Amino acid sequence: MEALSALAIACAAMQIISFGHESYKVAKAVSKDGSPNERLSDAVVHMKELSTTLHGHINSQPTGSPLTPSSQKLLALSKRCLDTATAITALLHYISTNTVGQSRAKRSVAGQTLRWWTHKRKLKALQEDLEGIRCQIETAILGDLW
């Protein structure tokens, strides 16, 4: 066997082992917590609460005074944050449950793991978007304070 063929076979075997290990970790987390990423769920809930509070605070300004440009920017960012957090929550709920008729039934661990693998990229993109929005909100608040 040529050296290049042996290297290709070894790489393919390592990729299969890596995939299996990550699948096992996700399946273990799903069977333990019911969600592939419990910390993400908690962080999303926290960001939704903060975004709703910020949105309510900005909207509670006296009706006669117009919003400043920085308040308008914070309002737009809090709305984006709330929308992104809602999308993540919906996707996590979709991964961990299955709609059967009118009732919701828990998916099996293997089914949840497979569903997580198929939506992994979308979930990661939403998570990165939420992190970027959080940084923009912090920067806008610090800019107003400065």
Image (cartoon, rainbow, N blue to C red):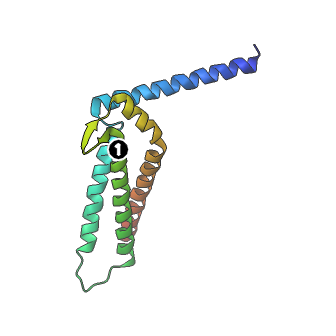
Is residue 51 shown above or below 105?
A: below
Is residue 59 shown above or below 8?
A: below
Is residue 32 shown above or below 87?
A: above
Instruction: Residue 15: name its quadrant.
Output: top right
> Looking at the image, which residue is at 28% across and 43% down?
101
Amino acid bearing label 1: Tyr
Of residue 76 and residue 27, the one placed in the foreground of this image is: 27
Where, quadrant-wise, is the C terminus in this rendering? bottom left
Q: Secondary structure at mark 1?
A: helix
> Looking at the image, which residue is at 38% across and 62% down?
80
Residue found farthest to the front: 101
User: Residue 139: x and y, percent?
Assistant: 41, 63
> Looking at the image, which residue is at 68% across and 23% down?
8
Where, quadrant-wise, is the N terminus in this rendering? top right
User: Residue 63: x and y, percent?
Assistant: 24, 83
Residue occupied by mark 1: 94
User: Residue 145: x and y, percent?
Assistant: 35, 69
Residue found farthest to the right: 2
48 on left or right of 114 = left
